[in-house]
């Protein structure tokens, strides 16, 4: 897995640009920390997401499942993470610099994570740690 140099800076720069250009819509959230069996979990709630814009497109009958990450817009695309992933900004973020680690090939979200998914996620975590960010 490749080293992701300057990932936090790339994400911040792209997020700022996309926000200024109106390419993403930031939704403020309320935060609550929940304890479950001694482990803290952060829950974010955004009432304004109920008013999120909806697509005007009608769904065509297709055997191919809809892939929201197929051909992401350049204004939200951050980088490729070979061999199987890429990083893209969330179009409707609930936290600043909210990005998504997506697979290049469509995979159902209900499927178990695979080795390459965990390696890609760890590469992102390591990039933030190496930059002194948590």
Image (cartoon, grey):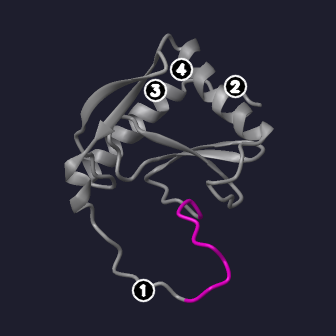
Q: Kindly state the secondary structure of the residue where label 3 is placed.
A: helix
For marks 3 and 1, the one nearer the N-term is 3
Instruction: Work out whether 105 lies above or below 12.
Output: below
Closer to us: 42 or 90: 42
Which numbered circle lies on residue 3?
2
Q: Position of residue 12 (x, y in %)?
A: 40, 32
- Residue extending farthest to the front is 37
Near mark 3 (Cα within 10 A), the count class, few <14, some 14-19 or many ≥20, is few
Dominant SS type (magenta):
loop
Q: Mark 2 or mark 3: which comes first in sequence?
A: 2
Gap in Å between the C-alphas at discs 4 and 3?
10 Å
Q: Secondary structure at mark 4?
A: helix
Dot 2: element: loop
**Span of residues in magenta:** 61-70
The label shown at residue 118 is none
Please tell me whether residue 69 belongs to the stretch shown in magenta. yes
Q: Disc 1 marks which residue?
A: 58
Looking at this rendering, what residue extends furthest in the bottom direction? 61
Alpha-carbon distance for marks 1 and 2? 41 Å
Q: For the N terminus, which image quadrant?
A: top right
Whether tag 1 and tag 2 are in contact, CB under 8 A, the answer is no
Q: Position of residue 73 (x, y in %)?
A: 48, 60
**Residues at circles 2 and 4 in contact by the CB criterion of under 8 Å:** no
Instruction: Report how far apart the C-alphas of labels 2 and 3 lie in the structure.
Output: 14 Å
Q: Which residue is mark 3?
A: 9
- Answer left or right for 95 relative to 127: left
Q: Mark 1 vs mark 2: give the one in front.
A: 1
In this rendering, the label closer to the viewer, 3 or 1: 1
At 35% from the left edge and 51% from the top edge, which residue is drawn? 92
The Cα atoms of the two marked residues, 2 and 4, are separated by 11 Å
For disc 4, the marked residue is 128
Indicate whether 125 appears above or below 29: above
């Amino acid at each position: 897995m490749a080293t992701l140099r300057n990932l936090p800076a790339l994400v911040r720069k792209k997020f700022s640009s996309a926000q200024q250009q109106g390419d993403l819509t930031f939704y403020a959230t309320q935060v609550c920390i929940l304890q479950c069996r001694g482990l803290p979990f952060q829950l974010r709630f955004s009432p304004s997401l109920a008013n999120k814009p909806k697509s005007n497109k009608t769904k065509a009958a297709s055997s191919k499942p809809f892939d929201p990450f197929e051909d992401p817009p350049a204004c939200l695309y951050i980088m490729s993470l070979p061999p199987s992933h890429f990083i893209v900004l969330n179009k409707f973020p609930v936290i600043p610099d909210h990005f998504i680690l997506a697979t290049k090939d469509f995979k159902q979200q209900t499927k178990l994570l695979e080795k390459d998914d965990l390696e890609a996620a760890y590469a992102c975590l390591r990039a933030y740690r190496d930059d002194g960010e948590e």
